[in-house]
Image (cartoon, helix red, strand yellow):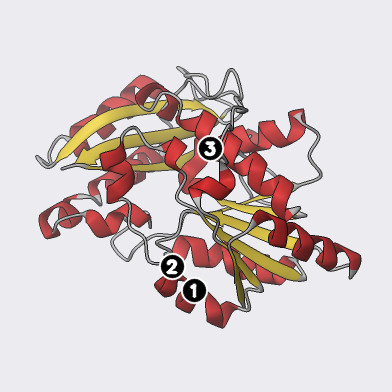
Amino acid sequence: MEIITKAARMRIVSGKLWAEERPIGFVPTMGALHEGHLSMVREARRMADAVIVSIFVNPTQFRSEKEFDRFPRDLARDADLLAPFGVDYIFAPSAEEMYPPGFASYIEVEGLSDKLEGLSRPGYFRGVATALTILFNTVHPKFVFLGQRDAQQTVIVKKLVRDLNMPVEIVVLPIARETDGLACASRNRNLSPEERLAAPVLYRALRLAEEIFSHGERSAARILKAMRKEIEQVPLAHIDYLAITDTEHLDPLDDLTDQNSLVSVAAYFGKNRLIDNVILSDEKVKSKGGRLKLG
């Protein structure tokens, strides 16, 4: 397993892999790897002949230098975690390598980036879309693996790939969870012991939504009201937003009859902001294979 830090070297390697007819499975990450990332690596190993994982903490995705500095980083630990999975290359560029002096070109997916997370974090998805476009153009993957925990991001990236006619297939994997239901996330390690005990309330609220829906409730307002009541029982949880939207345009829904719907939650636990989601699907619109579609 080679760690590559230069884009020029990465392009040479990816070109060689394609010349050898070894399609690339690519897992883009910001490091601080956890089971969610590793599940994507395992699927990449199954589907592709070569596996590349990027580790790049993207400064354009953070609201402040303080938030950027707080994000956990440990490249050596991440490399040790990836070694047993047959990863061929780690691409770990610096910010200067990704955004050289004079950089002035940005990607924005309109109509999707200013909702949900985009309302709370203006400019966030411009940073995501720009960084991923650079990575795709450098790595030249056939498959890109993303996680459902970042549901809005997967919808945006799928739209980006379609609109710009990129020869990339986006593969979305289910949310990996801790034993108590908390969605695996790099930021979880910043939680205090008390915050860590409180955080699974997000999953409990989402399970409550699923339960209410399974018993026939189709009013988004009533489901959201029940979720809010559940979360507000935990004093350390401070809701940023709760929303139920469609799974393609991310527009708010009122009636969930004959719909696939995305239930999203974001909340603060101290300084740490966590997100989670589930997809509710009416029987009439479930796919034959049972897989729920985002984007």
Judged by depth in the image, the label closer to the viewer, 2 or 3, is 2
- Say which residue label 3 marks: 128
- Say which residue label 2 marks: 75
Residue sitting at x 46%, y 25%: 123
Residue in the foreground of this view, choosing between 186 and 80: 80
**Dot 3 or dot 1, earlier in sequence:** 1
Residue extending farthest bottom: 84
Looking at the rendered structure, the kind of residue marked 1 is Ala
Would residue 13 be found to the left or right of residue 74 on screen?
A: right
- Packing grade of label 1 (10 A; few <14, some 14-19, many >=20) is many
Task: Give the distance between the C-alpha atoms of the residues marked 2 and 1, in whole angstroms.
Answer: 6 Å
On the rendered image, what quadrant is the N terminus found in?
A: bottom right
Badge 3 vs badge 1, beta-carbon distance below 8 Å:
no
**Dot 2 or dot 3, earlier in sequence:** 2
Task: Give the distance between the C-alpha atoms of the residues marked 2 and 3, in whole angstroms.
Answer: 21 Å
- Report which quarter residue 122 is drawn in: top left
Identify the element where label 1 is drawn: helix
Q: Which mark is residue 79?
A: 1
Looking at the rendered structure, the kind of residue marked 2 is Leu
| Position of residue 260 measured from the top left corner of the image (x, y, whole percent) | 57, 32
Question: Can residue 203 be seen in this snapshot?
Answer: no
- Report which quarter residue 160 is drawn in: top right
Badge 2 vs badge 1, beta-carbon distance below 8 Å:
yes
Residue in the foreground of this view, choosing between 254 and 177: 177
